[in-house]
Amino acid sequence: MQSVASLILRVTFGLTMLIAHGWPKLATFSERAAKFPDPLGVGSQLSLVLAVGAEVGCSILLILGLFTRVACIPLIITMIVAGFVIHGQDPWGRKELAFVYLYVYVALLFLGSGAFSAQHYLKHRFQNAPKPLRWILEA
């Protein structure tokens, strides 16, 4: 049952984040780069790179079920920044979505990829592989 829950959460929230948030940022990267919020003080362009990396790259990993726990960490950080910093002064209705994503990513951090994932397949496919490769597939 946990594997089904993980699959549903990974695919639905991964696709939604990718399509609704990550892809639009990637598609308009050059227009956004100079004026993107810089909540971490690293510059607008690097802040955008970090957001796109999490929202596109980590969402793809979630959808595939590959390194789910590791992929959740940048997404959790991004949602904390979005909820508490970017939308910190906004009314609840404006920041609510960031917290919904945050709760789901925290749940996936504990659930992991589950049996219906690329990682589960690779883990069993390479169960006799050298220890470093098996260790990577456990992440």
Image (spheres, helix red, strand yellow):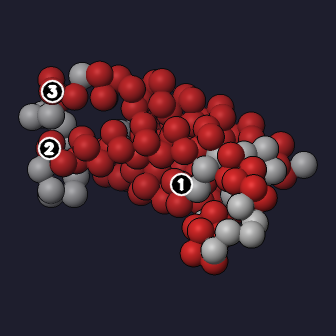
Q: Is residue 50 left or right of residue 104?
A: left
Q: Secondary structure at mark 2?
A: helix
Residue 55 appears left or right of 100: left
Contact between marks 2 and 3 (CB within 8 A): the answer is no
Q: Earlier in the sequence, mark 2 or mark 1?
A: 2
Question: In this view of the protein, which residue sits in the foreground, 21 or 116?
Answer: 116
Residue visible at 65% across and 32% down in the picture: 12
Residue annotated with mark 3: 30
Query: Of the residues under marks 3 and 1, which one precedes in the sequence?
Result: 3
Q: Residue at x 74, y 41 (%)?
A: 7
Spatial CA distance of label 2 from label 3 is 11 Å
Q: Which kind of residue does numbered mark 1 sit on?
A: Cys
Mark 1 residue element: helix
Q: Nearer the viewer, residue 33 or 114?
A: 114
- The alpha-carbon separation of the residues under discs 3 and 1 comes to 26 Å
Count the marks: 3
Residue corresponding to mark 2: 44
**What percent of the width, then of the height, locates residue 59?**
51, 40
Using the rendered view, name the quadrant where residue 49 is placed: top left
